[in-house]
Amino acid sequence: MPDQASVRVAQPEEDGVGIVEILRGPESYLTVFVLRDLLNGLQTLDADPACGAIIVRSEGKHFCAGRDWDTARDPEDTAEAIYAVAPELLELRTPWIAELTGGSIGVGMGLALCADYRVAADTAYLWPKFVKIGIHHGFGLTATLPWLVGPQRATELLSLGARIGMEQALRWGLVDRVAPSEAIANAAHTLAAELAAQPREALAAIRDTMRSPLRARFAEAIVHERTTQTALHDSKDFQQATGGGYRYQTS
């Protein structure tokens, strides 16, 4: 178990924008400990009446480069534990924005798609790479991806496991804003401040109406994903990819 916090929380200032920063650079690999700290940070800001919108960013090169199969050996750090926490990311009343830099790969893409909005650097990319290691997709991607791009395009993306650049992601609705790398923090903050300036109760009601079908779909999908992943653990493809430890290639 990590002996230090995985995230840093910045309380909202006058514009009502709070920030949760993942402190696991450069790759920002996801573990259950990082996810729990992230959720705690989000929930802390969600409970703060001064907070009207939240930005989630990473200090590292990547927003989240997925799971590190070389180091995911802690008995507490299991897929079951991660997937037990993941649905809580959709239960917040306060809108949150994923500020995407570098790669959002595998479960990292799943994390990014849980956000209400995604503001991305023009050099960022999304990569639903599960199929490349012979495993079924997880972290609710089979719910969030078709929610954003439709079932046919989602099936193609998940089946091919192709890397998605930001021009394409913006065109397909996978991200909401794209900015130059040096301006990404300002772009995310501008959208967050605009959201925080809206009447809070009305905004919360709109979000609840719009996202409640996704919450139900996500909770159901993540159970099916994990069951299917487990069934594929003994497959030749997955064993070859992960038997000696597998690290997502992020370049």
Image (tube, grey):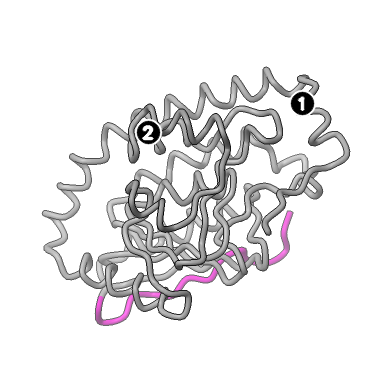
Who comes first in sequence, dot 2 or dot 1? 2
Q: Which mark is residue 3?
A: none
Asked whether 32 or 178 is in front, the reply is 178
Q: Start and end of the magenta stretch? A: 1-15
Q: How crowded is mark 1: few (under 14 residues within 10 Å), some or many (20 or more)?
A: some
Q: Residue 146 carries which label?
A: 2
Instruction: Report the residue at 34% width, 59% height from top.
Output: 46
Instruction: Tell me if residue 233 comes above or below residue 138 in the rendering.
Output: above
Instruction: Tell me if residue 240 comes above or below residue 61 in the rendering.
Output: above
Query: Would you identify the image quadrant in which residue 16 lies?
Result: bottom left
**Does the residue at mark 2 contact the one at mark 1 (Cβ under 8 Å)?**
no
Instruction: Report the residue at 73% width, 24% height from top.
Output: 233
Q: Which amino acid does label 2 sit on?
A: Pro
Residue 93 % position (x, y) = 28, 52
Instruction: Report the residue at 37% width, 28% height from top.
Output: 151
Q: In this view, does 129 lie to the left or right of 1?
A: left
Secondary structure category for the residue under label 2: helix
Residue 165 % position (x, y) = 49, 55
Q: Which amino acid does label 1 sit on?
A: Asp
Quadrant placement of the N terminus: bottom right
Residue annotated with mark 1:
237
